[in-house]
Amino acid sequence: MRLKSKDVFVETRGQGKRTDAQAFYTRSTGVEKLRYVGTTMRSDTLDTMERYFSSDNGRTWSGPEQIAFITSTPEGIRREYAQPGFVDLSTDRLVELVLVGTLPSDDPLEGLKSWHLDYRVSTDGGRTWSVREQVIQKGDCTPEHPLDCVWIGRNSVMVGDTTCRPIRTREGLLLFPAQITPVGRDGQYINPGGGYTYHEGVVLIGRWADGDRIEWDVSERVAIDPARSTRGAIEPTLAEMPDGRILMVLRGSNDVKPELPGYKWCSVSQDGGRSWSPAEPWTYTDGGNFFSPSACSQLLAHSSGRYFWLGNISEENPQGNLPRYPMVFGEVDPRSMRLVRESVTVVDDRMPDEHPRTMLSNFMAEEDRESGEILLYMSRPFTRSEKDWTSDAYLYRIEI
């Protein structure tokens, strides 16, 4: 395994703007792709978004289509963030989750009580949508109470990052990794760890119903003791092993308590994603721990039958989110469901003249259908200074 190339995928839109871009397949066969391009000038907030189509595996792209996703309302600013799409190969349907919320003062932290999820389905490669409706758990749930653990206005459900990719299980279920903010005895969002935010991992379980619709259920939640991860369990990523077990790897944090070890965490389901084992630090196959900052990561099941993980590994104990370098990839042993130490390879690292806050994170990866290479889409903000968001979007090709 080695890094084959690193190229600018989409140039920055201007000084102070981070450009993010992800591309994904839109049909169960062939090489049609859709690309989302967004710009960011502050944390956890998109300012613009465009989409492009390709019929030749990303060699050429159509012209940009501006996406309107910000609306001013009497209650505040309504934002809608479409997540990269997922193709159900057995039905040739493209599914996207859409993060929706109204923020009274347009502060991202207001989303902790506001976010909910819609889903939309396309049968023509993402050009039109046959269904768009809210994700509501079957039974007695409502738009205001969409899941048995979520009440909009008190807490929320969201997709943590673009690495939280859905999977289809052998049972035929669609599993969408997500996260919720918990509530206390008063029914309001609580932050028992005292960090920047606090979440618990969850899996939205979908099953196809009539008319391209999805019937929804929700798994039990995956929590991490706030005394061990101050921000709880964030940004789960999933992979189904050959024996049917499902591995979940989660982001933890030692924010405000840097004396705690900063790890990635894991949980396992043996019943199709419905219930989960207690979360524990994710280790190498030899049992050794490794440090990892509070940042997203991604599991990827490859067509070769191998499993890979992409994320950040630190030489020393991180402090909260930092440092978010180097970016590495490695192989996951399907029996132990742990990371193979000897396989870990650096994809990119901070250069000596770059700022210590340089971020090699907030990415997405997929397999190229023609070459079998892993395509990693990632930006590199803060290379110039601590507050400079300026970054192109890069495409890395990893040869397997």
Image: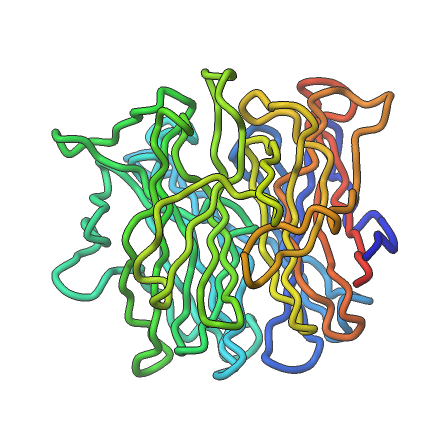
Residue 155's x, y, as percent?
26, 38
Q: In which quarter of the image is the C terminus?
A: bottom right
Colouring method of the image: rainbow
Q: In this view, does 260 lie to the left or right of 135?
A: right
Residue nearer the viewer, 373 or 254: 254
Q: Is residue 265 left or right of residue 191?
A: right
Residue 211's x, y, as percent?
33, 82
Task: Determine the residue positioned at 41% across, 64% down.
Answer: 175
| Residue 197 in sight | yes
Q: Quadrant of residue 316?
A: top right
In the image, is residue 280 above or below residue 331?
above
Residue nearer the viewer, 228 or 133: 228
Task: Determine the residue positioned at 53% across, 39% down.
Answer: 264
Q: In which quarter of the image is the N terminus?
A: bottom right
| Residue 106 in sight | no
Q: Is residue 258 left or right of residue 330?
A: left
Residue 12's x, y, as percent?
76, 39
Task: Determine the residue positioned at 45% across, 77% down.
Answer: 170
Q: How many labels does the image show?
A: 0
Q: Quadrant of residue 387?
A: top right
Q: Is residue 151 left or right of residue 85?
A: left
In the image, is residue 301 above or below residue 233?
below
Task: Determine the residue positioned at 68% across, 28% down.
Answer: 389
Residue 368's x, y, as percent?
73, 68
Q: Residue reaching furthest front? A: 286
